[in-house]
Image: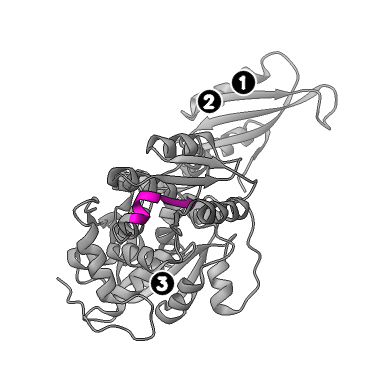
Amino acid sequence: MATLSAEPAATLPVTIADVQAAHARIRDSIVRTPTLISRTLSQMTGATVYLKFENLQFTAAYKERGALNTLLQLSDEARAKGVIAASAGNHAQGLAYHAHRLGVPATIVMPRNTPTVKVTQTEGHHAKVVLHGETFDEAYAHARVLEAECGFTFVHPFDDVRVIAGQGTTAVEMLEDVPAIDTLITPIGGGGLISGMGVVARAADHPIEVIGVEAELFPSMFNRINGTDLPCAGDTLAEGIAVKEPGGITSSMVSELVDDILLVSERSLEEAVSLLLQIEKTVVEGAGAAGLAALLANPKRFEGRTVGIVLCGGNIDTRLLANVLLRDLARSGRLARLRIRLQDQPGALYNIARIFDEQRVNIIEIYHQRVFTTLPAKGLITDIECEARDRAHLERLVLAIRAGGYEVSTVELA
């Protein structure tokens, strides 16, 4: 077991003693999620890779830790009046679940465009959901108004020392289970998780490098720390860390405790989500896969290290997950759409289908296009979606089609 120093860091608003006290407070009411080695990912990357399965918490995310630590420190009066938060994600569910379990009324303010499934899940934990505004900022502002009007206690998703200490308990458990970890790769949204984990890393009995990860589309903490002005916008798979403004407390802690912040592409996030399902048989949302995405994109950076990665959440829409998996199959060559130029005459499609049969490639869908094309009137374009064994198998099919005298191209993904 790694030894943690009890010496407080005078410059930090959260100390190792705070995190250890939080762990003692909450550990009997949360899932002690496993930290397990991934031999396959280790072989792929050259690092020794340990995964912390926080997607196995009851609400499928680590956010329960900070929410519960905050709830347990409220006065009886504050508990009676209730708590409020602005969130459309994991913080809402974690706070609602533990508030109900403790008999504390909870109100969650969400933007009006929040997906119905998230509203329903939060209401399922017996929270009162208030839909207000079109953006998170508008929902947040309304929550602060209700806080003042009703005497609620506002529970911030990341910029609160009690929340940060609670999130840091993730690293306490990781180092208890695997003392040899010398590198932590952790997603950054508002910065609560990595701030708490950084406190624990600094208190360990050996040097531990702390690496943060953000989506390229939302490099808000990267901008804050590095003085850059990269744009923060777009549809990212990692919506759980798509934060435009990181916290004040967390920014100061990240500046002090984090060694580097890496940015990952959407393609890397998709690959990581898909690999975790295929290799570890575990469902992880985009934000939860960000740590692995950074490792996969920078293998030389972590080669030979003993790496700990938090799979911090598993709440991903099933339709979105299906799209990610299908796109990954397409990139690997197992699924493809081939665009073939044919003559509009009897037997044309039969002759092409025969080549697919000879190459043992399965046809899934066929799309004929006769009208909206620049080809002559007797020409047509056929798109055929097909399933091959791998990239090499697909390339053999393409060569066979060309050998048959046809023009063929692959419709590529972005």
User: Which mark is in front, 2 or 3?
Assistant: 3
In terms of depth relative to the viewer, which is nearer, 34 or 83? 83
**What residue is shown at x 53% (from left), y 41% (from top)?**
130
User: In terms of secondary structure, where does tag 3 sit?
Assistant: strand
| Percent coordinates x, y for residue 377 in the rendering | 85, 23
Residue range corresponding to the magenta coloring: 77-86
Measure the C-alpha gap from mark 2 to mark 1: 14 Å
Q: Residue furthest bottom?
A: 10
* Circle on res. 81: none
Q: Which part of the image, by quadrant, shows the N terminus?
A: bottom left
How crowded is the residue under tag 3: few (<14 C-alpha within 10 Å), some, or many (20+)? many
> In this orientation, does residue 108 appear?
yes
For label 3, the residue is 211
Residue 313 is inside the magenta segment: no
Q: Residue at image x 35%, y 49%?
A: 80
In primary-sequence order, the first of circles 2 and 3 is: 3
Amino acid type, residue under disc 1 in the picture: Asn
Q: Is residue 382 above or below residue 322?
A: above
Q: Which residue lies furthest to the left in this view?
A: 1
Amino acid carrying label 2: it is Ile
Residue to which mark 2 is pinned: 363
Mark found first going from the N terminus, 2 or 1: 1
Where on the picture, by quarter, is residue 67?
Answer: bottom left
Q: How crowded is mark 1: few (under 14 residues within 10 Å), some or many (20 or more)?
A: few
Which amino acid, mark 3?
Ile
The local secondary structure at tag 2 comes to strand
The tag on residue 351 is 1
